[in-house]
Image: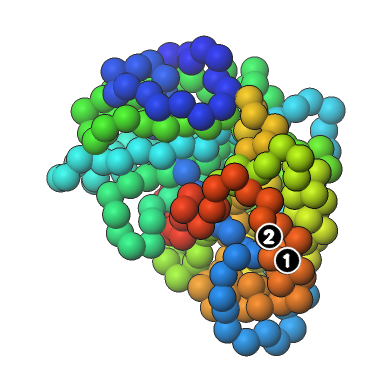
Amino acid sequence: MKKKNLTGQRSLPRSSKWLSLCASGLMFSFIAACGSGSENNSNDKKTAETDTITVNEGDTESFQELGVINIKEGQWEKYLSTMQTNIANSRQEPENLSFTLYQPEDGKQQALWFERFENKAAYDKHQEYDYLKAVLEVVGEVADGEITSIALKEVPEVPAAVVTPVPAKDQSKRNVIVLFDVKPEKRQAFIDAIAEVTPHARQALGNLGFNIFQYADDPNKFALIEGWESVAVHEAHLEQDYSKKLDAAIEGIFVSNPMDTRWLAKDISQ
């Protein structure tokens, strides 16, 4: 089923047809610039095993959705198997750019999804497939409480990279998802700081993705999505000079503490 006015962050009742979005994935946040880490060593080049990353510079505006759902006790496997089937099929859609499902590293029965399409029309078409409708049915049974979904768009100053997924067999891989609420007068300073660090992060040893997105209905709210080959390379990234420079540049510019809306997660898409 299609959803209407898919902008911004909202809580959805389990019976809502809007669940077709929520069922498709997990909310994953990674902050690569706000932690402590291990030793430096040369972090300027990616390893051969990392994903292929290309920047989306098309004329149409891409469409992104980030969501989070809590799952009832005893219902995790039912949700997971249905979602994984949905993701495998969704990734085959010609206009799908990515689709990832995450679970917090602490094992909490919470799922986060992040999906990207070339444009909103492609996303709307995606809602009509049977594998997504199957998720919608299951979500109505397994969701524990309300479901949150956030529509996102790219930040023009920092074009998002398209990341080719790799098999998620190694659970040592780290994903970071962070939500930022920036003071209106500090918005450009935040964007400038992220634009400065992004090329360094994408070229860092073991980086699998580093993208910033803006809420579709609020220019002062953002979501950062990161992927790393391991906890160790993520922590090493945080110790780099460019990360410390970012820490200094964004100090005091937020309405709320981003660490309160930060997830360290594993990829459970497959």
**Residue 248, which numbered label?**
1
Q: Is 41 situated above or below 17?
A: below
How crowded pointer 1 is (Cα within 10 Å; few <14, some 14-19, many 20+) is rated as few
Whether residue 159 is visible, yes or no, is no
Could you tell me which secondary element the residue under label 2 belongs to? loop
Residue 243: x and y in percent read 71, 69
Residue 195: x and y in percent read 80, 53
Residue 224: x and y in percent read 62, 50
Which residue is drawn at the image coordinates 21% and 28% (left, top)?
A: 141
Are circles 1 and 2 on residues that touch, CB within 8 Å?
A: yes
Q: Residue furthest left?
A: 74
Which residue lies under the disc numbered 2? 251
Closer-to-camera residue (261/257): 257
Q: So how many labels did they put on this image?
A: 2
Which residue is drawn at the image coordinates 50% and 64% (left, top)?
A: 174
Which residue is drawn at the image coordinates 59% and 45% (left, top)?
A: 255
Q: Classify residue 96 as left or right of residue 76.
A: right
Residue 187: x and y in percent read 75, 42
> Please, which colouring scheme is shown?
rainbow
Q: Quadrant of the N terminus?
A: top left
